[in-house]
Amino acid sequence: MWAAARLGLPAGEEAEAYAKAVVAADFEAPGDDDVINKVRADLEEKGIAVTEAELRSELERAAAEARRQIAQS
């Protein structure tokens, strides 16, 4: 959802569809590189500069939030 917001996608169906596409990219190869590469390419295509460190930091933040939500269930 962070990347969708950076891409200027409106909240709702478009942002959720993009988030699902990013999740699907995660199944292409082991590790996080496939997700990092997809999001970086999508952002760069729109002229949005982002570092790998920034992407990895945001990915870790999102993973921590997911773990927190699962623990609360």
Image (tube, helix red, strand yellow):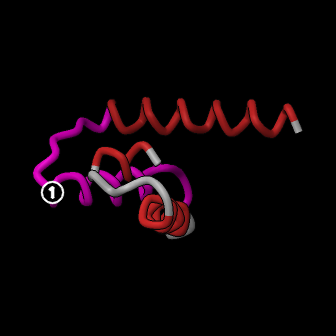
Q: Residues within 10 Å of mark 1 (few under 14, many from 20)?
A: few
> Which residue does the image show at 49% across and 59% down from the upper left?
12
| 7 relative to 28, above or below | above
Taking 67 as reference, is 2 left or right?
Answer: left
Residue 67 position within the rendered picture, expressed as x and y whole percent measured from the top left: 73, 35
Residue 64 position within the rendered picture, expressed as x and y whole percent measured from the top left: 64, 31
Magenta span covers which residues?
30-53
Residue 16 position within the rendered picture, expressed as x and y whole percent measured from the top left: 51, 61
Residue 65 image-quadrant placement: top right
The quadrant the C terminus occupies is: top right
In the rendered image, the residue lying farthest to the left is: 47
Residue 18 position within the rendered picture, expressed as x and y whole percent measured from the top left: 43, 64
Q: Is residue 29 visible?
A: no
Taking 24 as reference, is 47 left or right?
Answer: left
- Name the residue carrying label 1: 46
> Which residue does the image show at 24% across and 58% down from the upper left?
41
Residue 65 part of the magenta segment:
no
Residue at disc 1, secondary structure = loop
Residue 10 image-quadrant placement: bottom left
